[in-house]
Amino acid sequence: MTQHAPSSPSPLRGEGRGEGLILLAVAFLSLGFQLWLPTTHVGESDYQAVGNTLASERQPGDVVLLAPWWTERARIYVPEGTPVVGYQGSDADPLERYPRIWVLFEPRQPNAGLGAFERAFLPSRTPLGEERPFGNLRLRLYQNGRYRPLTVDAAEVLGSGAAQVYLESPDGNRQPCGSTGAGYRCPNNKLVAREWHEVHFAPYQCVKLEAPGSSTRVVVEFTAPASDASALSAGYIWEYGAHRENTTPTTVWLEVNGQAQTLELPVGDELMHRLEGPPLPEGAKVRIALASGNPTARVVCVVMTGSRRSP
């Protein structure tokens, strides 16, 4: 009598069973997510209650920080005149212009990441009072230990018409840029202006500068009040940051009473870079300048400020 070896399960049949189990697990997870999602809903009355609280308790100079940053719907309920900050990476923003920060947290948002938020946000911040719940929203006020009272902001000076703007060649020859009311139009037909722009997710009100090309510099000059510290931040306006073809690095200068520091912006770089400047004596002559060998896509957002130490 011929004996046959016992048959083994078909590999294809085993694979099919495995795929079925995976699909079943995915189905259960999807069902669980659909059942959980409504529990994250924020009611209209909760948003309105947060807005009413802010309206009655806010002080001049306060800011609202959204956590997580995509809690966008809350923006429309924040009282007019109170800035709202929320973008990728805003958890770590020093918010040094604001003495107090209202954190509006929506902890039931998917991937809200409370632990990561606290690690980035809490250093040098002190809670003022208890956290207050409004349905699925949480509101808490903090003293901002990173606050630095501003003494001067180059964008504001430019917008007020109190700056001189010109093109400067290597031999020192200057070609003035004429005021247009909204900014300054230079002889090369490029505009220097105070504008809002985005650099690496973050919005900035900045001095928009375009490189004239070659070794010619575009310069913004003004007189500044006494300040304990100064700083300059610069980065390519985001639609130009990733450009690599036919582009050159850019140099940004911060000059105080003839003493200059430089900041280099590499090709293909999309980040905002920061330079810590010196204290500013009363009546300091400040010059901000920019140059790049090839002007193609070399459009830069520059933020220059002077500040006092925290009170």
Image (tube, rainbow, N blue to C red):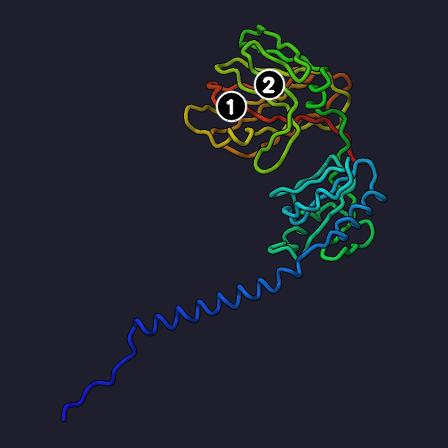
Mark identifier at residue 298: 1
Classed neighbour count for the residue bearing mark 2: other residues with Cα under 10 Å, few (<14), some (14–19), many (≥20)? many
Percent of width and height locating residue 149: 77, 32
Q: CA distance from mark 1 to mark 2?
A: 13 Å
Foreground pick, 74 / 130: 74
Counting residues from the start of the chain, the first of labels 1 and 2 encountered is 2
Q: Nearer the viewer, residue 45 or 151?
A: 45
The extreme right residue here reads 56
Residue found 61% across the figure and 31% down from its top: 274
Q: Quadrant of the C terminus?
A: top right
**Number of other residues with Cα within 10 Å of mark 1, as a class: few under 14, some 14 to 19, many 20 or more:** many
Say which quadrant the N terminus sits in: bottom left
Q: Secondary structure at mark 1?
A: loop
Q: Is residue 182 above or below residue 36?
A: above
Which image quadrant is residue 102 in?
top right
Q: Is residue 53 above or below residue 157?
A: below
Please state the horizontal and vertical placement of residue 237, each as a whole percent of the image: 56, 29
- Secondary structure beneath dot 2 equals strand
Could you tell me the amino acid type at mark 1?
A: Arg
Instruction: Identify the residue shown where x is 19% and y is 87%.
Output: 4
* Residue lying at 74% horizontally and 43% vertically, measured from the top left: 64
Q: Which mark is residue 4?
A: none
Residue 71, x across and y down, in percent: 66, 48
Q: Which residue bears the numbered disc 2?
A: 289
Q: Quadrant of residue 301?
A: top right
Amino acid tagged 2? Ala
